[in-house]
Image (spheres, grey):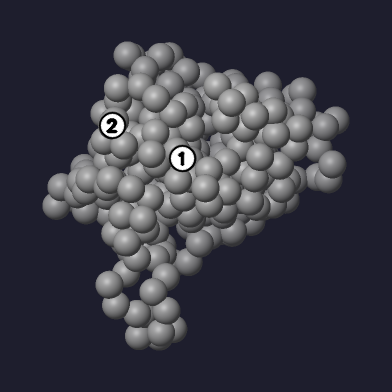
Amino acid sequence: MAINEVVVTSLGDLIDKVTPPEPDPRTGRRRDSGVYRGESDARRPLLTSLDKLSGLETPHGKADLEEHILRNFVRYSRPYFPAPPVNDWEVLVTAQHHGLPTRLLNWTYSPLVAAHFATVDGGGELDRVVWRLDWKSVHRRFQLPEIALPVQDLEGILGGDRPATPWALFAREAGLKEFACMFEPPSLDQRIVVQSATFTLCSDKRQSFECFLESHKLGSALTKFIIPAGEAARFRDQLDLVSVDERRLFPDLDGVAAEMRRYYS
């Protein structure tokens, strides 16, 4: 099935559309299990920071540099780790968190946080988008547990008879099959906690994430909630009204300054 597209015209409309119509029979609650990602251009594919390293016009052009980039990060970053990483997956997460180009894709459990990143620049003539991923259906397709994987479990779950490390993934070793999964990062700092952050990891770094899912007949795991360009400013004001802003999502002096700069511009 194809990726579903839904137009939303207000923050309340978005919340209504992501709220399950019926309570979960096990819990009695209307809690959505999907994860979300906000983009300021609804036409843009789901590209990782590694994909975008060669530019948006020619993505994936520097995919072969992935291993070299991480090796140099490891080389120079060790003195700055407050505690030894659990494994090399945690190193990869830390690198992504601090802006290194990687194959990881950021998501959040909160549609409001995703809407913030979709509308933070306020104006413009582009439609925005909040992507929703039904990660449980992705896990079912690739025969993975229907749980949010902790980073320390990635080696055993993905590797079969041999531990699956980032290096094995880069080199396509250890008999790794094609897969995509969602996993939760450790709480490296307060920003990860307040943003309800999570990541997806994909075995393929030569195509965008939605194209990979569609190639495995998983297009229906994605929904695009389109925010029309004319409604983006209203969305932004509504997010400020419910205190979803830089000061709360980046709880430091940079976040305070960013909110003041945008709010008073």
Q: Position of residue 13 (x, y in %)?
A: 31, 54
Residue 79 visible in the snapshot: yes
At 39% across and 25% down in the image, what residue appears? 123
Image quadrant for the C terminus?
top right
Which residue is labeled 2 in the image? 230
Residue 260's quadrant in the figure?
A: top right
**Relative height, residue 120 to residue 195 (above, below):** above
- Front residue of 143/135: it is 135
Which residue is labeled 1 in the image? 237
Label 2 vs label 1: CA separation?
Answer: 13 Å
Q: Position of residue 208 (x, y in %)?
A: 32, 33
At 48% across and 45% down in the image, what residue appears? 239
- Front residue of 157/174: it is 157
At 40% across and 41% down in the image, what residue appears? 235
**Residue type, label 1:** Asp
**Relative height, residue 36 to residue 69 (above, below):** below
First of labels 2, 1 by sequence position:
2
Q: Secondary structure at mark 2?
A: helix
The answer to whether residue 19 is left or right of residue 244 is left
The answer to whether residue 2 is left or right of residue 263 is left
The answer to whether residue 126 is left or right of residue 159 is left
Q: Position of residue 254 (x, y in %)?
A: 71, 29
Q: Secondary structure at mark 1?
A: helix
